[in-house]
Amino acid sequence: MKKVVITLLAALGFMVGAQANTAGPAWDKAPEKTTDLAALQNGAKLFVNYCLNCHSAAFMRFNRLRDIGLTEQQIKDNLLFTTEKVGETMKSAIDPRQAKEWFGANPPDLTVIARSRSAAGKGTGADYLYTYLRGFYVDDTKATGWNNLVFPNVGMPHVMWELQGKRAAVFETVTEHGQEAHVFKGFEQLTPGTMTPAQFDQAMGDLVGYLQWMAEPAQNTRVRLGVWVLLFLSVLTLFAWRLNAAYWKDIK
């Protein structure tokens, strides 16, 4: 019986180790920017310029960007590339048939992407996106010439490589439980981008903040309203408690 228990524990340890190898890197914590209007406006600009070419946000209208401080004229002058009407939804410019031919599948709609990605013990959908967008590296074995640390063999190329520059991923081969595994050690900068690493991280934080806001534009209003409701209920509870005490004080 003792041998059986030891064997089961060893097998469990091997399974946990194997899962750790295939689970990918830890996700970085995304900065909270859903209340920063300047960051949201920059994120919207990045989304329209770099994401909307292939990805749609079919449940978001351009005129909703007024909620983050943009005027209708600013939206028309700077963000309308795929339509002429500010009341239209954010549809991608790419033809779906061409997208499937080039990338193997249609790029997903990004309206609620920030709410759809999460993993216990790793982080939220925003953390996933923040790590993913900063996880591209050059890989000549792939059709696009790029790979991603968070999403291996991804069909999406690194559309913002000019901002970040070209990087190579450095892996070290180690032996775990009698099996070889490739452990990520860091990135090696091959060519500089138009942004410094810190500036690129900030820009990706702005983009992720916009994706969070787009997934639920009313979230900040809901939070503010919730705070006022809780304050009202607290005051109401205090009055009810004192009224109850005054009503029953003469009854023994």
Image (cartoon, rainbow, N blue to C red):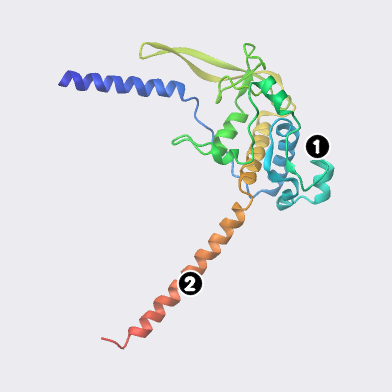
Q: Which residue is mark 2?
A: 235
Compared with residue 12, is residue 208 higher up or lower down, i.e. above or below? below
Q: How many residues crowd around disc 2 within 10 Å: few (fewer than 14), some, or many (20 or more)? A: few
Q: Which mark is residue 208?
A: none
Give the residue pinned by disc 1.
Answer: 81
Q: What's the residue at 66%, 14% (across, down)?
A: 143
Residue 243 visible in image: yes
First in sequence, mark 2 or 1: give its number: 1
Which residue is rendered at x = 76% and y = 45% of the image? 88
Amino acid under label 2? Val
For image coordinates 66% across by 38% down, the residue present is 207
Q: Are marks 2 and 1 in contact (CB under 8 Å)?
A: no
Residue closest to the eye, 9 or 186: 9
Which residue is outermost to the bottom? 250
Residue 98: where, in percent of width, then height? 72, 23
Question: Is 125 situated left or right of 161 in this image?
Answer: left
- Say what secondary structure mark 2 lies in: helix
Residue closest to the eye, 206 or 158: 158
Tell me if residue 158 can be seen: no
